[in-house]
Amino acid sequence: MTDKTSPRGIRNNNPGNLRRTDTAWQGLADQQADPDFFMFKSPIYGIRALARVLIAYQVKHGLRTIQQIIERWAPPNENDTAAYVKAVSADTALPADQSLDMHAYADLKPLVEAIIKHENGQQPYTGAQIDKALVLAGVEPPAKNLQHTRTVKGGKAATAATVGLGVLQAVQDGLAPARDTLQTLVPYLDVAKWLLLAITLIGLGVMIWARIDDHRKGLR
C-alpha cells in the first residue's frame, strides 16, 4: 500500500515515471488523475511498461548501454543525466559503456531495479514482483533447477528420514530374537528413530513453508 508521503511514481504504480502519451499501456488505471504521468492499476503493470520501453530502446533505436539508454530516458535538458548514468552503473555494477541485451533477464532486471531506485529514491518491490512484471513484458527468468528448490529439498529430507525409520524398525525387529545379548543397542536405535522422525517432520515443515512463502510472494 502507498500513501501521500510516498514518491509520486510509487503512488501512481508507475515507478519508472512514464509521462502520459497516447500509448494505451496494459494495466492503466481507469482514472488518470495525474495530469503528467501515467497511473497503473498495480505496480506490476507499471514495471512492465518500464521494461517494455527499455526493450523498445534496443529494438527501435539500437540503444544497448547504460549511457545510451539513460541519455534517452532522462535527457540533459530535464535531468542531471551524468549523475543518473553514474548512479545506475553503480547500482547495477555494470560499466556505463558495456553492451547489454534488454531481452536478457540478467541485464534487464538490474537495470529496471536501478531506474526505479533513482526515480523514487527507493526500490520497494520484491524480486517476485519484478519477475512477474518482466514475464508480462516478455522476458522470463532462468528456469529453476528443481533439484535445488526448497520444496524438493524438504521432500527429499522427509523421504530419506521415512526410509531410515523403516530400516531401523526392521533392524530392531530383527534383533528381537537376540535382545538379551544385544540389549545395549536398543536405546541407541530408539534415539535414532526419534531423530529420524524429527527430520521427517522438519522436512514436511520446510515443504509447507516454502509453498506458503511462494504464494505470499506472488509465485505460483
Image (tube, rainbow, N blue to C red):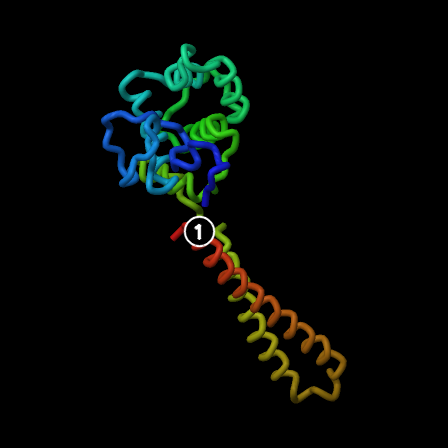
Horizontal and vertical percent position of residue 158: 53, 66
Decide if residue 121 is on the left or right side of residue 219.
right
Quadrant in the picture for residue 143: top left
Q: Residues within 10 Å of mark 1 (few under 14, many from 20)?
A: few
Task: Please report the residue visible at 48 percent of the width from the left and 14 percent of the height from the top.
Answer: 80
Give the residue at the far top of this rendering: 77
Task: Please report the residue visible at 70 percent of the width from the left and 87 percent of the height from the top.
Answer: 179
Horizontal and vertical percent position of residue 153: 52, 56
Quick one: SS at disc 1? helix
Task: Choose between 207 and 90: the one closer to the eye.
Answer: 90
- Name the residue that disc number 1 marks: 146
The image shows residue 153, relative to residue 83, as above or below, that is below
Q: Which amino acid lies under the numbered mark 1 shown in the image of this protein?
A: Leu
Task: Please report the residue visible at 49 percent of the width from the left and 55 percent of the height from the top.
Answer: 213
Task: Choose between 117 and 143: the one closer to the eye.
Answer: 117
Task: Choose between 46 and 163: the one closer to the eye.
Answer: 46
Quadrant in the picture for residue 46: top left
Q: Quadrant of the N terminus?
A: top left
Residue 27 seen anywhere in this rendered image of the structure: no
Q: How many marks?
A: 1
The image shows residue 201, relative to residue 13, as above or below, that is below
Horizontal and vertical percent position of residue 172: 63, 81
Decide if residue 190 is on the left or right side of residue 218.
right
Horizontal and vertical percent position of residue 157: 55, 62
Residue 111 seen anywhere in this rendered image of the structure: yes
Quadrant in the picture for residue 133: top left
Task: Choose between 207 and 40: the one closer to the eye.
Answer: 40
